[in-house]
Amino acid sequence: MTSVDPQYHRKLETRLSAFDGRATTILGEMEAELQQDRSYHSSLIDLAGSNDNNVSSRATWLMKSALEKGKSFSPEQVDQILGVLGKITIWDAQLHICQSVQYLSFGRQQAKLMVSWLRKLVDHKRPFLRAWSLDALIRIGLDFPDLVEANELIIAAGNDPAASVRARARKLSKGAGL
């Protein structure tokens, strides 16, 4: 794991647990204030696996936000994410991870681990989680076609009862040339 300052880690955890979950602008303000610390991203990754679902959800939201703004995670940080995946059990934190896949670079072994985790979410009861796990799988499949049977996933998602999943399947089908 990348070096994490324990005092900073506790401070970040306390701030995340105190957030009321309502206005994400507060998370953005927190991000602007705290992201300069060298432990910030590694602490977020570690906190993504927190037993406190609220901390997990907020940490993954901030991870996704950093990636969307152009932050790239090192191979060691990707390994760190893969190491906490099994602890991320709340659906919105899982969703944030799925939505972050498009910004991450995977080696072959890393991709295998992520694909294994994502496959468990394709049949989730929440449609957005199904849609975004499909998105993540297809994106990984573009780099590692032998790991993901993209056509079969697209066909199955095209028959999903949720419009959001069917729409994501259509978009992926066009974008991936499937």
Image (tube, helix red, strand yellow):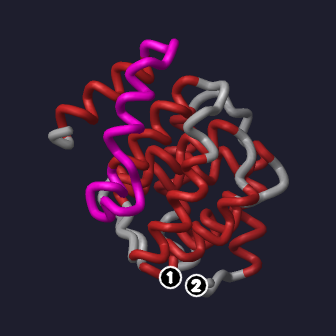
Q: From this view, report whether residue 19 is shown above or below residue 140.
A: above
Foreground of the two, 100 or 24: 100
Q: Position of residue 139 (x, y in %)?
A: 33, 51
Residue 149 in the magenta stretch? The answer is: yes
Q: How many marks?
A: 2
Could you give the CA–CA distance between mark 2 and mark 1, rounded to whole angstroms?
A: 7 Å
Kindly identify the residue that appears in the image at 47 percent across and 51 percent down: 64
Task: Say which element carries label 1.
Answer: helix
Label 2–label 1 contact, CB within 8 A? yes
Q: Is residue 123 left or right of residue 147?
A: right
Kindly identify the residue that appears in the image at 50 percent across and 82 percent down: 76
Kindly identify the residue that appears in the image at 61 percent across and 33 percent down: 123
Foreground of the two, 50 or 84: 84
Foreground of the two, 171 or 49: 171
Residue 115 in the magenta stretch? The answer is: no
Q: Is residue 94 left or right of residue 158?
A: right
Q: Position of residue 159 (x, y in %)?
A: 43, 18
Q: Is residue 30 left or right of residue 141?
A: right
Q: Quadrant of residue 90?
A: top right
Q: Earlier in the sequence, mark 2 or mark 1?
A: 2
Foreground of the two, 26 or 90: 90
Q: Which mark is residue 76?
A: 1
Q: From this view, report whether residue 120 is shown above or below residue 131.
A: below
Q: Image quadrant for the N terminus?
A: bottom right
Q: From this view, report whether residue 79 is shown above or below residue 94.
A: below
The magenta segment is 139-163
Residue annotated with mark 2:
2
